[in-house]
Structures are given as C-alpha cells and as structure tokens.
Amino acid sequence: MAKILKIHPENPSEKQIDQIVSILKKGGAIIYPTDTVYGLGCDIFNHKAMEKLARIKDIKLEKAQFSFVCSDLSDLAKFSKPIDNSIFKLLKRTLPGPFTFILNASNNLPSIYKNKKTVGIRIPDNPIPRMIVEKLGNPIASTSTYSDDEIIEYTTDPELIAEKYDKLVDWVIDSGMGDHTASTVVDVTSGNPVILRQGKGILETYL
C-alpha cells in the first residue's frame, strides 16, 4: 500500500525529504511533483527499482527511455558528452524549467543504460525533486504519470494518483494539484535544438 506524504510545495521539510531518500536507497519507487505533471521515479543505480519502474509502465527495461531528474547542471559533465557552448547557454537559460533535453550520453551511465546513446536530462522548477536528488547524491530515473488516453484528474490530483498506483509504488508525495501538460522534449544531440514533443515549455521564448 502506497503511503501519502504531504510536503509543502515551496518550503519542503528536510526531515520529510530524508524519508523519501531513505525509501529510494532501499529500492523504492515514488510519485513526486514537478513543474509539470506528477512523475514516477526511483534511484538510477538500483536495478530492482528500475525493473519495478519498467513494470509499472508495462515496458521492458532495456527499451525504457527514462530521463534523469537532476538538481542542477553539474551532472551534465558526468552523464553526457561535451556539448556546444551555445547549447550549454540554452540549458542555463531554460533550466530549471519544464523541459527535457536529449543529449549524447557519456560512458558513465549506470549499467542499466549501457547501450543508450542518448540521455534525457530534466531539472524541474520545483524544489522537492531537486532536494531529493541533492540528498540522494545522484539523479533519479523519471517517467511521467501522464497518458493521453487517461482522465486528466488521474494525472493531476495526488489523491487520485495514489489510488491508481496504490499497490505499485511505495510513496506518493502530495504537494497539491499538478499540471496536466508534460514537459517539452528538445533534442540537442546535433548541436541544434529540435522539439520532439511540444509540452508546457515554450522554447522560442529562450532562443
């Protein structure tokens, strides 16, 4: 049975964040708020947790395209190949924000990602996931609770989300209603930004 933990959206309690981090370190899966829709997440270095995340999404782990939620841009040097200065400046202008950037992956990805040539990086404009990642010490794997064919309330209302995922995740963080629009996905692997999915973020604003 999933536990619901109410966390203040602007001033998260460190004690509560520590509780979430402890669950992640034990291989737990969580539902957490972002600056867009609520997300499903786990520790990228925990194989069992990653398998659990894949089962929840009903996909094979080797085919999963889970992005990394990071606390800041410092993880780029570890998990992505060097990027053009113009792209780095774009990331600095847009992040934290409602974007997922697809980058060329480095050789330092967790073993589960070893055959991936690209990696999606997400830095939400929400203190809760950034604090979780900072205290955990590494990014969390992330995928959206959003689905085009679902009732909107089931992806925005944390109580309804908890009801739906009750036996699938360990904790649901409730920080109020979420958005109903996912992040904008931008591929920058070629050195030029290409929008793969238009979401909440308006890239033209930053170009």
Image (cartoon, rainbow, N blue to C red):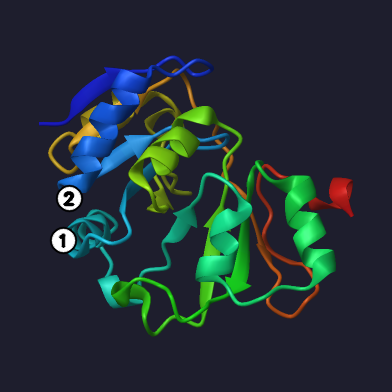
Number of numbered markers: 2
Asked which secondary structure carries label 1, the reply is helix
Q: Name the spot of residue 17 as percent of width and height, x first.
A: 34, 27
Q: Residue at x 37, y 21 (%)?
A: 14
Find residue 27 and name its label: 2
Q: Is residue 94 left or right of residue 120?
A: right
Q: Name the spot of residue 25 as percent of width and height, x first.
A: 21, 46
Q: Quadrant of the N terminus?
A: top left
Q: Residue at x 38, y 48 (%)?
A: 137
Nearest the camera: 57 or 8? 8
Tell me the amino acid under the disc marked 2. Answer: Gly
Q: Is residue 118 left or right of residue 66?
A: right
On the image, which quarter does residue 50 sit in?
bottom left
Q: Residue at x 85, y 66 (%)?
A: 86
Nearest the camera: 64 or 19? 19
Q: Is residue 207 left or right of residue 162?
A: right
Q: Above or below — where is 71 with respect to 110?
A: above
Q: Above or below — where is 89 with respect to 71?
A: below
Q: Are marks 2 and 1 in contact (CB under 8 Å)?
A: yes
Find residue 201 and name its label: none
Q: Name the spot of residue 66 as percent of width and height, x first.
A: 41, 62
Q: Tell me the crowding category of disc 2: few under 14, some 14 to 19, or many 20 or more residues within 10 angstroms, Cα based.
A: many
Q: Name the spot of residue 29 as percent of width and height, x first.
A: 24, 45
Q: Residue at x 80, y 73 (%)?
A: 192
Residue ID for mark 1: 48
Q: Is residue 116 visible?
A: yes
Asked which secondary structure carries label 2, the reply is loop
Q: Tell me the crowding category of disc 1: few under 14, some 14 to 19, or many 20 or more residues within 10 angstroms, Cα based.
A: some
**Residue at mark 2 to residue at mark 1: CA–CA distance:** 7 Å
Tell me the amino acid under the disc marked 1. Answer: Lys
Q: Quadrant of the C terminus?
A: bottom right
